[in-house]
Amino acid sequence: MRLFLQLLFIPLVTFCLSTSMAFAKIDYVTVEKTGTGETAKAAVHDALGQALGQVNGMQMSTKERSALSSVRVEANVLGEKGVAELNSEEFQQEVQTATKGVIKSYEVLALGNDPYNKKLVNVTLKATIAKYKVSKQSKRNRIAVLPFRLENTEDIIQADFAKTLAQGLVSYLAQSRKFAVLDRDFEKESNAELDSLKGANVPVEEMARLGNRLGTDFIVVGQINKVVAKKWFKEMKSTGKKFPMSQYGGSFTCRVIDVATGQVVFSQLYENIKTIQGSLPDMSRISKKDADVVGRKIVDGIFPLVVVSVSGKSIYLGQGGETVKKGQKFTLVQYGKRMVDPYTKEFLGREEVAIGIVQVVDVQAKTSRANILKCSVDMNKVFTPNGFIVRLIKGSGGQKSAAKKTKKVEKVIEKSMAEMEKESSDDW
């Protein structure tokens, strides 16, 4: 008997969980609308169509308007009797069936002649509409990476480089968790999937997805000017020995454009062509590295990496995933006064004062932790939300130039500390 109950309990729990998950993204919104038509039925259709359009967009409204035409129930009188007839269970069921449950319910509040045209009927009603609940991520600034233009459309190497570069940018921007990244590579497949939701047997949970296609705030565009991927052998005159040589890399422009205004909010001419002794590296890896560099500049330009918390000798950064790597060193920066352009009066940003150096020791999906290596202030005492950011020290991912650049930053911090100590002694 106990075994039977266990076998019965497991699928029951599974069903309840799956049901709650299936309905987790559906909300019901109640709106009030007034419709006009030659008959009461037409006026109700108009009001319900407006309600659907307001909650789920005009794509949903147009589709469901046609479905509402199949409703057969009609109100023959105006006033309170007509209201009662339109609110009847029979009419409610007809509307719910015609819209496949997207209109959960409605209530007619008033029914009468249009005051400006006695041949028309006005209906005021409240309708409860099923709405697809979009994720919190969709509330972020939305950005789309468009295919890069090619200087030479017949160059296969350029085409492959442009494709992997765009894919790398999409990956980096998504990992930064600062944007809602919209797909532009598989729109055909996405549209086909949405078309499948218009079938006859699609449940309300899926129907509510229609009308929720997001528009973008920013687009990333660019042009590939040059891509080099060649190899040869260099012969030493003294010994006749041959060494493999290679030249690789790319040159391209990249812009981020505000779609609403057409304003260029970021622009970069990037060129990284190298000549080395050795075999030719995988060009897809090179374009991925280039994408990481440009992606970081885009994110840092719009959303600098912010210090979100301080604990002892560690700070926590509001970014993780693939965009932050263990071992990287950053300059710790404290925001100062606001700066304004004296001519245009446009806000330019805030003063940035280098106060320390930190190194990443742990990376999670959304955050990362860095140890404070050097700092001119006590972070535990002076920390305020949105008051500190970090800037990556170039080459800190293990390259030879990292130590030299770190020492340069250290000198700046030491100078800052000396100035602060001098100011403190002058005060006394």
Image (cartoon, rainbow, N blue to C red):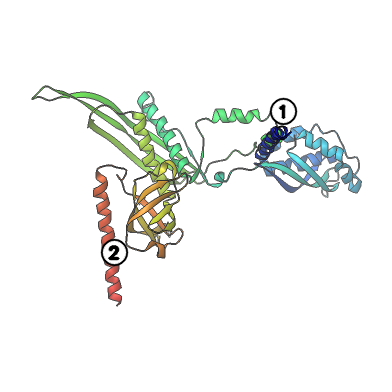
Which SS class for mark 2? helix
Quick check: 391 left or right of 216? Answer: left
Residue 417 circle label: 2
Question: Which amino acid type is shown beneath numbered disc 1?
Answer: Asn
The spot of residue 47 in percent (x, y) is 77, 43
Disc 1 target residue: 201
Quick check: 360 left or right of 236? Answer: right
The spot of residue 286 in percent (x, y) is 34, 33
Residue at 36%, 41% (x, y): give it: 293
Say which of 177 and 326 sits in front.
326
Q: Which of marks 1 and 2 precedes in the sequence?
A: 1
Q: Quadrant of the C terminus?
A: bottom left
- Residue 313: which quarter of the image? bottom left
Q: Quadrant of the N terminus?
A: top right
Residue at 30%, 76% (x, y): give it: 427
Say which of 116 and 401 sits in front.
401
Which SS class for mark 1? loop
The spot of residue 262 in percent (x, y) is 48, 44
How many marks on residues?
Answer: 2
Looking at the image, the residue that sits furthest to the left is 238
Say which of 367 and 285 sits in front.
367
Quick check: 84 left or right of 248? Answer: right
Residue 266 at least partly seen: no
